[in-house]
C-alpha cells in the first residue's frame, strides 16, 4: 500500500496535473530546458522510477490512468486483483506493469482493448505469461487479426476472449461493464465502466479538443458515433469521470459529460459542413486545402482536419 499512499499524498498536493499539462505544453513548444525541469518535478512528486518518461495517478479509489505514448491507459489495482484497459506499445506496457506490481505482484487478472489500433493494443505482447485473458469486442479482435495479417505483424498478441453487446466482470472488488453501442471511431469500440468508482474509459470514442481519426477502413460511422455519444450521456451521469483516448495539447485526457457533449457537437457540425459543402459542389481536395476549422465547432483545432473531411465525404457518398 506504500505506492497507493504515495500517490494519494501527491494527489493532495494538487500541483500534479498542472505540472503534467505544463509538461505537455513545454514539449509542444520545443522548450527543452523547461520540459526537463518540469519532468524532474513530476518524478519527484510521484516518486516513480527515477527514469520515468510516463505519467500515472489515481482517479477514484483504486482506479487510475497511465500515459506515455499512444492512447491513454486505464487501470484498477489492489490486493484483490489488477485490470488494465488498453496497452499502448510494449515498452509502455512494461513500464506500467512495473508500477502495478508494486501494488499487486501476483498477476494481471484481465487486459481489455477498447479497439484494435496499435497505439491501444500493440502492448498486448508485454502481458504474455502474466495475464489470464485479453478481452475485446468481437469486431476489434477481427480487426486486429486482419491488420496483423495485412502488415505481416507476427509478434502481435490478439484477444482470446470477446463480447458482442455487453459483458460484466467482477474483479478487484469492482464491477467492470463493457458496453458496445455500434460503429463509431471503428466498428469495434468498447466503452468500459468501473461501476463502483464511476470511472469510464471511452477509448478513441473521445478525442478531446483534437481532430479525431475516423477509421473508415475499419467500419467507422460518424452518424452512429453521434448516437453512441447520446447513449453515453444517458447511460452515465454528471458525476462520472471519463478517460479519453487522446486530447490536444493543453487539454485534459480526463473529463466529464460536458466534454462528451462538446465532441458530439463537433461530429454533428462536421456532418452538416460535409452536406453543405457537397451541395455547394465543393471538391474534397479544394476543401482540404482551405478549411482550418469546422464551422460551429471552433474548439477543435490543430492538425488533422483533412482526416475528418475525407471521412465525411466518404460517408455521405455511400
Ligand atoms: Zn484509435
Image: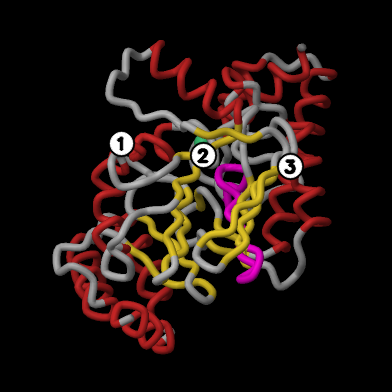
Q: Nearer the viewer, mark 1 or mark 3?
A: 1
Disc 1 crowd rating (10 Å Cα; few below 14, some 14-19, many 20+) is some
Query: Which quadrant holds residue 91?
Result: top left
- Can residue 189 be spotted in the picture? yes
Disc 2 crowd rating (10 Å Cα; few below 14, some 14-19, many 20+) is many
Q: Secondary structure at mark 2?
A: strand
Disc 3 crowd rating (10 Å Cα; few below 14, some 14-19, many 20+) is few
Q: In the figure, is residue 234 to the left or right of 259?
A: right
List the residue tagged with mark 2: 135
Q: In the figure, is residue 86 to the left or right of 26?
A: right
* Residue nearest the viewer, comparing 263 with 193: 193
List the residue tagged with mark 3: 295
List the residue tagged with mark 1: 125
Task: Check the image and report above or below for 75 versus 79.
Answer: above
Q: Position of residue 314 (x, y in %)?
A: 69, 16
Q: Position of residue 124 (x, y in %)?
A: 36, 38
* Residue appearing at x 66%, y 64% in the figure: 195
* Residue nearest the viewer, comparing 144 with 14: 144
Q: Which residues are magenta?
A: 195-209
Query: Which quadrant holds residue 167?
Result: top right
Q: State if disc 3 and disc 2 touch (CB < 8 Å).
A: no
* Residue appearing at x 45%, y 72% in the figure: 58
* Residue appearing at x 60%, y 53% in the figure: 169
Mark 1–mark 3 distance (CA, rounded to whole Å): 42 Å
Q: Secondary structure at mark 1?
A: helix
Whether residue 205 appears in magenta in the rendering, the answer is yes
The N terminus lies in which quarter of the figure? Answer: bottom left
Mark 2–mark 3 distance (CA, rounded to whole Å): 39 Å
Q: Position of residue 239 (x, y in %)?
A: 71, 73
**1 or 3: tag closer to the N-terminus:** 1
Amino acid at each position: 500500500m506504500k505506492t497507493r499512499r504515495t500517490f494519494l499524498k501527491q494527489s493532495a498536493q494538487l500541483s500534479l496535473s498542472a505540472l503534467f499539462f505544463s509538461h505537455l505544453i513545454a514539449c509542444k513548444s520545443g522548450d527543452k530546458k523547461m520540459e526537463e525541469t518540469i519532468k524532474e518535478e513530476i518524478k519527484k512528486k510521484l516518486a516513480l522510477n527515477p527514469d520515468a518518461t510516463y505519467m500515472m495517478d489515481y482517479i477514484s479509489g483504486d482506479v487510475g490512468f497511465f500515459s506515455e505514448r499512444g492512447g491513454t491507459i486505464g487501470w484498477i489495482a489492489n490486493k484483490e486483483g489488477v485490470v488494465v484497459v488498453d496497452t499502448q506499445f510494449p515498452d509502455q506496457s512494461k513500464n506500467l506493469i512495473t508500477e502495478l506490481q508494486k501494488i499487486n505482484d501476483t498477476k494481471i487478472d484481465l487486459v481489455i482493448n477498447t479497439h484494435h489500433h496499435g497505439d491501444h493494443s500493440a502492448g498486448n505482447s508485454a502481458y504474455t505469461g502474466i495475464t489470464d485473458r485479453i478481452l475485446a469486442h468481437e469486431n476489434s479482435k477481427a480487426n486486429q487479426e486482419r491488420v496483423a495479417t495485412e502488415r505481416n505483424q507476427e509478434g502481435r498478441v490478439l484477444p482470446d476472449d470477446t463480447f458482442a453487446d455487453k459483458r460484466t466482470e467482477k474483479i478487484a472488488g469492482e464491477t467492470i461493464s463493457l458496453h458496445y453501442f455500434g460503429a463509431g471511431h471503428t466498428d469495434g469500440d468498447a466503452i468500459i465502466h468501473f461501476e463502483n468508482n464511476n470511472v469510464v474509459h471511452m477509448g478513441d470514442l473521445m478525442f478531446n479538443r483534437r481532430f479525431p481519426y475516423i477509421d473508415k477502413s475499419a467500419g467507422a460511422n460518424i452518424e452512429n458515433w453521434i448516437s453512441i455519444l447520446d447513449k453515453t450521456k444517458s447511460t452515465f451521469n454528471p458525476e462520472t469521470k471519463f478517460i479519453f483516448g487522446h486530447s490536444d495539447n493543453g487539454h485534459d485526457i480526463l473529463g466529464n459529460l460536458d466534454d462528451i457533449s462538446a465532441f458530439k457537437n463537433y461530429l454533428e457540425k462536421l456532418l452538416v459542413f460535409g452536406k453543405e459543402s457537397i451541395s455547394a459542389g465543393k471538391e474534397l481536395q479544394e476543401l482540404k486545402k482551405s478549411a482550418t476549422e469546422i464551422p460551429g465547432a471552433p474548439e477543435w483545432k490543430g492538425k488533422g482536419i483533412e482526416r475528418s473531411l475525407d471521412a465525411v465525404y466518404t460517408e455521405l457518398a455511400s
